[in-house]
Image (cartoon, grey):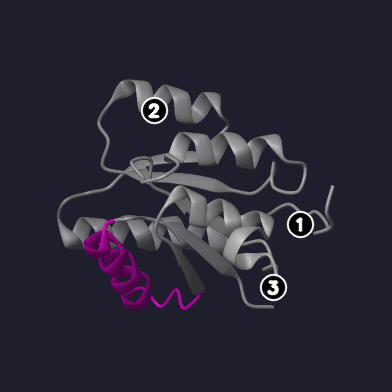
Amino acid sequence: MEKVVLLVEDNPDDVDLTLRAFKKNHLINDVVIARDGVEALDYLFGTGAHASNPNPLPQLVLLDLKLPKVDGLEVLRQIREDDRTKLLPVVVLTSSKEEQDLVQSYSLHANSYIRKPVDFLQFSEAVRQLGFYWLILNEAPPNAPRNDS
């Protein structure tokens, strides 16, 4: 079964960089892109645009914090509050340098917090290491069943 990565990112340049880095490092997973917090939650919980066709849970969520509609911290809070997604690996991938964002992310049980490097080569290496660890080495918890509560 193909491993799906949910990339929650509103900046088109960062989406392109992430996809290029995945491709460059031969991490050819299916990357689903959510461009705001609402879209991410709809994908994960089979609501809104995804209500008629619920998706399998991703192997990994790469979550930006500064998102329109619903911010990344609220997305993380909702992921952790739901039995279906509370064990889902979530890596915060953000340009935020605010210590409060780091502390809040870990308080909400983010699995990892990575600041996006500005340089493409550094960013590509960070994505390579992230993908290798989370998609190849890490043993993920089994997905909870997708039935309505």
Judge from the rendering whether residue 57 lies leftward or rightward of residue 26; answer left or right.
Answer: right
Under circle 3, the secondary element is loop
Does residue 130 sit above or below 29 in this rendering?
above
Identify residue for label 2. Answer: 102
Furthest residue in direction left, as rendered: 119
Does residue 66 sit above or below 41 in this rendering?
above
Identify residue for label 3. Answer: 53
Q: Residues within 10 Å of mark 3 (few under 14, many from 20)?
A: few
> What percent of the width, then of the height, locates residue 141?
73, 52
For the magenta stretch, what is the residue range?
Answer: 11-29
> What percent of the width, then of the height, locates residue 145?
83, 58
Which is the main secondary structure of the residues drawn in magenta? helix
Q: Looking at the picture, which amino acid does disc 1 mark?
A: Asn
Q: Residues within 10 Å of mark 1 (few under 14, many from 20)?
A: some
Q: Looking at the picture, which amino acid does disc 2 mark?
A: Leu
Q: CA distance from mark 2 to mark 1?
A: 26 Å
Identify residue for label 1. Answer: 143
Does residue 144 sit above or below 33 in this rendering?
above
**Residue at x 46% of width, y 24% of height:** 104
Q: Nearer the viewer, mark 1 or mark 3?
A: 3
Front residue of 130 and 118 = 118
Q: Looking at the picture, which amino acid does disc 3 mark?
A: Asn
Q: Are marks 1 and 3 in contact (CB under 8 Å)?
A: no
13 is within the stretch colored magenta: yes
